[in-house]
Amino acid sequence: MPKDVIRQREVPNDHCHGRACRRVRRPGGRAIGDALRGGEAAESDDLAIGAWRAQRVEHDADVVVACGPEALPALQGEARRVFRWHGRAGAGPAWELADGATLIAEDASFTERDAQVVAPGVDPQSPRHLELPLRNIGHLARGAGLDLEHPLTVAVFDLDADALPEDAVDVWRAARRRGPGDLQLALCARVAHNDERAWHAIGELNDYAGDLDDVHVIADVAGHGDGVVNALQRLARAAVAVDQGYGLPTAEALLKGTPVVAPPAPATKALIGRGVTAASERGQRLHALVEDPGLAAEQGREGAAKVHERFLVTRVARDLLGLLA
């Protein structure tokens, strides 16, 4: 089989997005979180969910903010209560724990409930985004297996049930068909160290890309690969956004002056304008950016200015404080 042809794998009849699903026993909080995001709790999760619901959080705070479904048991007592979550929220169990709380979503399209909207932001002081000397960028890229003599594109994503990084491979293939034939792709998968499902998924992603020349799967485990991700986003001619949640990696790449090709998403609309669904068209745009450094630099500068203006954590803190005032 030619190495530039992706082997088709059986797609299960469920919501696993082309990746084989496994029944994994989950902590109660994670099972509730999955259900609120549109999944289903397995019967094997019942005991863990019961123990999670029975938690009691003692505090004397004036305001309690639960960040994510897993933190819902903290919304107890007489304090003012706030429930903030990332991504989409469905109609799963445990919503009653947030009754009477102020709800905060990342985008109005992510929920049908009455919620305040606070878009996420990028921390420029994070190791993932600090300025790096050129020698460090080269050293980190070579350590990750990249060839500095060949052009690079990068895709950064959280490896969870919502991610479909294979789409980034399709975009890369479409760009390679137009040239240059030596364009590399780095798939930077952010993995929680205690997420058993993510470790299964990264093995499958390695299998998916294993026969492809110039495709590199790089695991960023619990943030320990921040420096490598930082270097690759700076070295890349352009980034490919994976369709996942709000799409904050688009802002992360643009902060470094690296242009992005992206599918429709809230971050795409705010920072780029119009996203493109078809992988072939995104591949055409990626090719144009790789071949025209002037165009890439212009789009990178424009995007970086927008991120500095509207997508830093200082703006997030201001928005949240305004809601809590």
Image: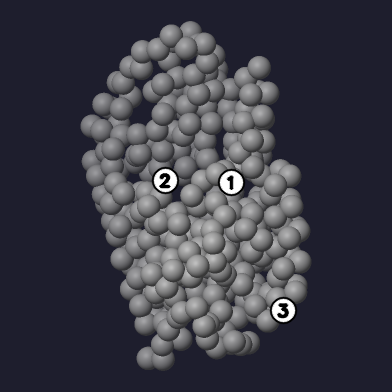
Which sits earlier in the primary sequence, circle 1 or circle 3? Answer: 1
Please report contact status of discs 2 and 1: CB closer than 8 Å, yes or no: no
The residue depicted at 63 percent of the width and 87 percent of the height is: 178
- Please determine whether, in this image, residue 128 is positioned above or below residue 109: below
Q: Image point 48% across, 8% down: which residue?
A: 78
Image quadrant containing the N terminus:
bottom left
What residue is drawn where x is 31% and y is 53%?
A: 197
Residue type at tag 2:
Gly
- Secondary structure at badge 3 equals loop
Q: Residue at x 58, y 22 (%)?
A: 102
Residue on which the image places disc 1: 124
> Which secondary structure lies at badge 1?
loop
Q: Which residue is mark 3?
A: 292
Which of these two is toward me, 172 or 12? Answer: 172
The spot of residue 146 in percent (x, y) is: 44, 75
Q: Which of pointers 3 and 2 lies earlier in the amino acid sequence?
A: 2
Amino acid at circle 1: Pro
Q: Position of residue 105 (x, y in %)?
A: 59, 36
Note whether residue 270 is visible: no
